[in-house]
Amino acid sequence: MNSHELRVEKTAKYVTHGDPSTAKRVWICLHGYGQLAQYFIRNFEDLDPKDNFVICPEGFHRFYLKGVSGRVGASWMTKEERLTDIDDYVRYLDHLYQVVVEPIRNSDTQVILFGFSQGVATGSRWIALGSSSFNRAIFWAGSFPPDLPPLKAKQKFQDLPLTCVIGDQDEYIDEEGLKKIKAHLSALDIAPNWVEYAGGHLIPRQEFNKIANTL
């Protein structure tokens, strides 16, 4: 048996909130595993739509969360054909940036990359492997993928202000896991600002607004 690949055109979905013509900040927000963009974007509804334009792209891979019917979620990738999927979503996100962000960006516009859970790994790879540029990144309840090319990661993250946020009751990242994440970042010479809050694997609106109001 021989395995082959064929590149085809794919229709990608993204949802937005806010006014791109007046926005001082453009947020590109990457959802976690099993989420859909139209629901994930609700986390950012408190942002003033005059000053903030939020873009939530959706991962290519949709599936039923339970069984063969009911609620649907999306994923950025799985372990199957992972390198191809990474290449695909980096190309997709770079294209979205060129089509949606570049036309509205000027010297005063702040472009913020926000990743939640699986979106942290996705955002990390996009920064390291893609061609898009950001003024800052906020990574929430997720970890850097261990296979990031060290040299590219160091170069791309060197001058990028990065905030990492984690709940003290996160069911996917315990204390030992957090130590490993911090050690991995340290080995890459990446020194984020760490913010910890009381809570689990979610984005508490009060905690998000607290960070957003400092930008």
Image (cartoon, rainbow, N blue to C red):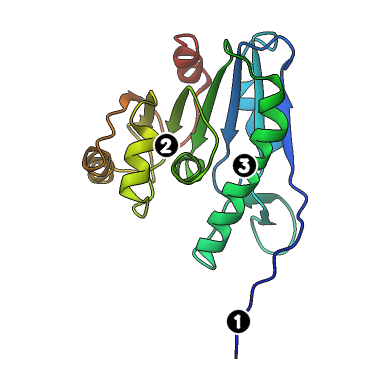
Q: Is residue 39 above or below residue 184?
A: above
- Number of other residues with Cα within 10 Å of mark 1, as a class: few under 14, some 14 to 19, many 20 or more: few
- N-term-proximal mark, 1 vs 2: 1
78 over 213 or under it: above or below: below
Q: Secondary structure at mark 3?
A: helix
For residue 129, say whether it is visible.
yes
Q: Residue at x 68, y 38 (%)?
A: 96
Res 196 quadrant in image? top left
Tell me which amino acid carries mark 2.
Ala
Instruction: Identify residue for label 2.
Output: 141
Counting from the top left corner in percent of width and height, residue 197 is at: 36, 24
Instruction: Tell me the distance, in whole angstroms, between the alpha carbons under discs 1 and 3.
Output: 26 Å
Q: Nearer the viewer, residue 23 or 115?
A: 23
Which quadrant holds residue 47?
Answer: top right
Residue 3 — which label?
Answer: 1
- The answer for how far apart the CA atoms under marks 2 and 3 are is 21 Å
Which residue is found at the position 53% from the left and 20% from the top? Answer: 205
Q: Is residue 25 left or right of residue 136?
A: right
Q: Splitting the image into 4 quarters, where does residue 53 fall?
A: top right
Q: Residue 40 placed where, x, y %?
A: 63, 34
